[in-house]
Image: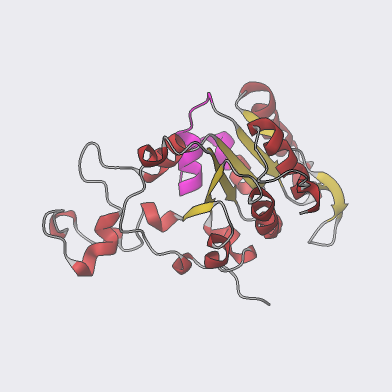
Amino acid sequence: MPPHASPSDISTPQTEFKASSYASDGKIHILLSATGSVASIKIPLILSALSKYSNVSVRLVFTTSSLLFLPPLTELLNIPNVDGIHLDHHEWPKDLSSTPAENLPTSASPDRENEETTSAIWSKIGDPILHIELRRWADILIIAPLSANSLAKIVGGFSDNLLLSVVRAWDTNKPIAVAPAMNTLMWEHPVTTSQIKVLETEWKWFKVLRPVEKLLACGDSGSGAMKEWSSIVSWVVEEMKLKLESEGGDVGNA
């Protein structure tokens, strides 16, 4: 099995991400995410296709379970137009719970031993909060694939990871596109039907890119496979009016 991504691939940045730093860059800001589905293996293909567009900046948000299906994250950072990767521990450092607040160093006198922890901790009004800054930065959020678990959490209002926090804090004047991917019986389950109905009929800022029928990774055959990655890119290109670097590009054959 080839090496896969790990949370340790991208350490906690020492400089906080601020949306305002990119407000005048003249680019379409695409926040692309993957959740815990084998269809996450298509992320490099989606990124390769988006790399052809001159007016695009892409940032990635991955759930921990999606990392099993992705290559080492440093490889994704080498793809043109990919400008950042954001993971759960960038907002919630893993050692946060074991560091009493009264022992945290002040910003005026940082302690190198705790630097990774303090760089991501909100301490005063006006400090950047990562999921809020990502929401401010993004013109569109694409979740491809969207697992059954993450679908249920979104509809239920959960926000227990970075991606779900972005979704929960989203500006509903901007679109979220989701490409569900799951086993056929999970997709056909009445619970899924009711959850998709919420996204398609009640939450107008969502666009559901419905799955297709094919042989699934589990060996079953039927509906539930993520929509073809090239069709997802084509939808984004049309929706966001992306511009090719040069004439004659064909995103579907990337």
Q: Is residue 161 visible?
A: no
| Vertical placement of residue 109 versus 232, above or below | below
Quarter of the image for residue 215 reads bottom right
Tell which of 167 and 240 is nearer to you: 240
Relative depth, front residue between 24 and 104? 24
Q: Is residue 150 magenta?
A: no
Q: Position of residue 17 (x, y in %)?
A: 36, 48
For the C terminus, give its image quadrant: bottom right
At 20% from the left edge and 41% from the top edge, which residue is drawn? 124
Left or right, 196 with reference to 78: right
Examine the image and state in which quarter residue 115 appears: bottom left
Q: Going 53% across and 23% down the picture, which residue do you hit?
A: 173
Name the residue: 24% across, 37% down: 126
The image position of residue 70, as x and y in percent, is 62, 63
Q: Is residue 50 visible?
A: yes
Q: How many marks?
A: 0
Question: What residue occupies the far bottom of the structure in this picture?
Answer: 1
Q: Which residues are magenta?
A: 153-173
Does 155 lie within the magenta span?
Answer: yes
Q: Is residue 15 left or right of residue 47?
A: left
Q: In the image, residue 214 lies at what x, y percent?
A: 87, 52
Q: From what the image shows, is residue 169 above or below residue 39?
A: above
Colour mode?
Answer: secondary structure
- In the image, residue 3 sits, relative to residue 244, either above or below, namely below
Q: In the rendered view, would you say 188 is above or below 99?
A: above
